[in-house]
Image: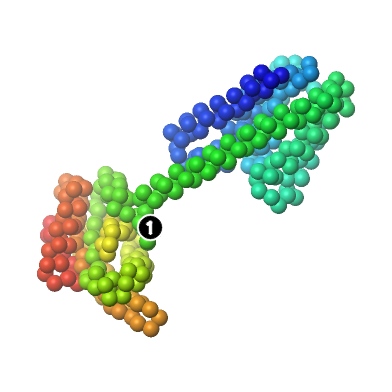
């Protein structure tokens, strides 16, 4: 019996590990999906249906443990198909009994009904519904067939609880780790102050858009004289100004554009499929809009700010690349700053 239990536990751990390893390599975003976990549990149910545990001479398969957990993820179609698959396997093996099906359905219905009345976490709900199910299921088999002792019933209940507990704990840990990885990857490409994409995200998206767009406009935007506000009012006020600038730029950026914070007081706007002439006019419109916008230092004091914008432009017909686009925008911003700020600068095509 102990060897059979060990085999079941080893199979559960191995299948979960290799399944999620394959899913993670295929598409990381699928790891957290309930449907992904429901499919895994369906695979476990079909595998465990083949592996019997000898308890006092009575062969018991633990297929119902992952099968019951599927209901926790609210996927009735996957549950029904898995249950049908298990019953077909049992029919092929010649151990198909209508009485066992009836007992299973009654036990499952009562357990599922009880789950809806629990106001606990998913883990507690699954434990309660699982306990109720296996108690009814095994007692039903005991009464119907009279070939299983009460001691066998209680041993089977303990074993199924161990497998259910192990499976649930592993799935919870995988979800937790997946969320940590997702957060880490998002932080790598996110500016923490503004929640905009950072310079890494900018580099990634420029490369992607240059490969897929015919035209791409880059505005490199710098707040004029921003360091004086940090010095005079403090960095907390400076951060508040940065956030207000983000809101202002979002409101005047065209639909389909992307806004990034490169660091400090410098921002970038990427705009796809805009002609060069329209790009120049739009940049000047953004500059004027910021010039006329009021920024709050505190509840009683407002200030005006200006920005300087360097324009870079990519066109497939000109065969420009990512390096050229960044260099053009940076050079134009630097030249505009030297010539007096609060202006736009571009290199004629």
Q: Would you name the residue on which mark 1 appears?
A: 192
Q: Nearer the viewer, residue 74 or 172?
A: 172
- The image quarter containing residue 194 is bottom left
- Tell me if 19 is positioned left or right of 94 in this view: left
Label 1 element class: loop
Q: Is residue 75 above or below residue 93?
A: below
What x and y, as percent, mark residue 39? 58, 34
Q: Is residue 215 above or below residue 23?
A: below
Residue 169 at least partly seen: yes
Location of the C terminus (image quadrant): bottom left
Which residue appears at 38% of the width and 58% of the height?
Answer: 192
- Tell me if 153 is positioned left or right of 238 in this view: right
Location of the N terminus (image quadrant): top right
**Residue projecting furthest to the bottom:** 300
Number of numbered discs on residues:
1
- Figure coloring: rainbow
Which residue appears at 80% of the width and 27% of the height?
Answer: 153
Residue 284 at least partly seen: no
Q: Is residue 295 above or below residue 110?
A: below
Which residue appears at 58% of the width and 38% of the height?
Answer: 171
Mark 1: few, some, or many residues within 10 Å (few <14, many ≥20)? few
What x and y, as percent, mark residue 60? 74, 22
What x and y, as percent, mark residue 107? 79, 36
- Tell me if 62 is positioned left or right of 257 in this view: right
Q: Is residue 155 above or below residue 76?
A: above
- The image quarter containing residue 257 is bottom left
What x and y, as percent, mark residue 59? 75, 19
Which residue appears at 65% of the width and 28% of the height?
Answer: 45
């Amino acid at each position: 019996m102990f060897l059979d239990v060990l085999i079941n536990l080893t199979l559960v751990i191995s299948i979960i590990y290799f399944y999620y390893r394959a899913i993670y390599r295929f598409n990381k975003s699928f790891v957290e999906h309930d449907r992904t976990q429901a499919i895994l549990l369906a695979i476990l149910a079909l595998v465990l249906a083949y592996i019997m545990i000898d308890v006092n001479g009575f062969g018991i398969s633990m297929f119902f443990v992952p099968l019951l957990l599927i209901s926790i993820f609210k996927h009735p179609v996957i549950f029904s198909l898995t249950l049908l698959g298990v019953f077909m396997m049992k029919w092929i093996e010649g151990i198909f009994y209508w009485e066992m099906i009836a007992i299973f359905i009654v036990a499952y219905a009562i357990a599922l009904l009880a789950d809806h009345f629990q106001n606990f976490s998913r883990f507690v709900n699954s434990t309660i519904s699982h306990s109720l199910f296996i108690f009814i299921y095994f007692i039903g088999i005991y009464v119907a067939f009279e070939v299983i002792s009460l001691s066998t019933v209680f041993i089977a209940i303990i074993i199924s609880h161990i497998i259910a507990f192990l499976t649930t704990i592993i799935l919870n840990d995988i979800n937790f780790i997946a969320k940590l990885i997702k957060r880490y990857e998002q932080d790598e490409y996110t500016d923490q102050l503004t929640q905009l994409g950072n310079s890494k995200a900018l580099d990634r998206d420029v490369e992607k858009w240059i490969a897929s767009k015919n035209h791409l406009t880059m505005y490199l935007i710098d707040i004029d004289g921003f360091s004086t506000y940090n010095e005079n009012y403090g960095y907390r006020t400076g951060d508040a100004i940065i956030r207000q600038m983000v809101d202002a730029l979002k409101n005047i950026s065209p639909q389909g554009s992307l806004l990034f914070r490169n660091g400090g007081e410098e921002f970038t706007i990427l705009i796809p499929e805009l002609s060069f002439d329209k790009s120049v006019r739009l940049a000047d419109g953004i500059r004027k809009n910021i010039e006329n916008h009021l920024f709050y230092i505190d509840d009683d004091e407002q200030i005006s700010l200006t920005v300087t914008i360097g324009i870079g432009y990519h066109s497939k017909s000109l065969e420009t690349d990512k390096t050229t686009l960044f260099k053009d925008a940076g050079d134009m911003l630097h030249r505009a700053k030297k010539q007096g700020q609060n202006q736009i600068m571009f290199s004629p095509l």
